[in-house]
Amino acid sequence: MAQAVDDTDLVARAAGGSDGAFRALYRAYARPVYWIAHRLVGNPADAEDVTQETFVTAWRKLPGMRLEGTSALPWLATICRLQAANRLRSRQRDRARTTEIPGDIVDTVDVEKQVIDTATVEAILREVSTLSELDREIFRLCAAEGYGYQAAADHLGVTTGVVRNRLSRIRTHVRTAVTETERS
């Protein structure tokens, strides 16, 4: 029978500046983080880079981090997903640059898509601006900064249920606003 993992002490010591504790976390989770990254980015070289970026980011965020649960893997997996998304966006930008005509003139410009994207962003921002201060903070933390429910709840001094319920309503309101914008 497998023992439950408890990284609480390691995370606390690493947050306090212990290189040894952070190395132990790295040894314990580098492989799972690598496989998450590989699944997301699709190739070994980028997966290695994303894994490294994940642990560099984790090291920087450790002093202010409070472990939710007993395993550091969910937190590291969240950082990994964000780093992988950054890597994929970078890849897209690189591909877009290689398809440009000399003189930096793009071959085709999809004006309709740009107008729709702008309208969608404006609808989201407009909807978010109508929310209460607490709801705007929940949206910022969870949707924009990638906080989990518990981390956002702790940051805001509310319960996880409050964050979960309000975020669900926020998403419904935003989705409705975006859908109405797309129909227009």
Image (spheres, rainbow, N blue to C red):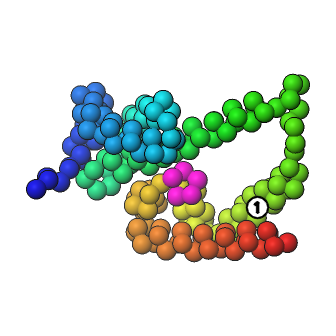
Q: Residue at x 10, y 56 (%)?
A: 1
Whether residue 114 is visible: yes
- Magenta region, residue range: 142-146
Residue closest to the far top: 102
Q: Position of residue 140 (x, y in %)?
A: 58, 56
Magenta part, dominant SS:
helix
Q: Residue at x 54, y 72 (%)?
A: 168
Q: Residue 150 lies in what quarter of the image?
A: bottom left
Q: Position of residue 103 (x, y in %)?
A: 89, 25
Q: Residue at x 20, y 49 (%)?
A: 6
Q: Which residue is mark 1?
A: 120
- Let me know if residue 113 is in the magenta part: no
Label 1 is placed on what type of residue? Answer: Thr
Q: Residue at x 44, y 62 (%)?
A: 149
Q: Nearer the viewer, residue 161 or 24?
A: 24
- Let me know if residue 145 is in the magenta part: yes
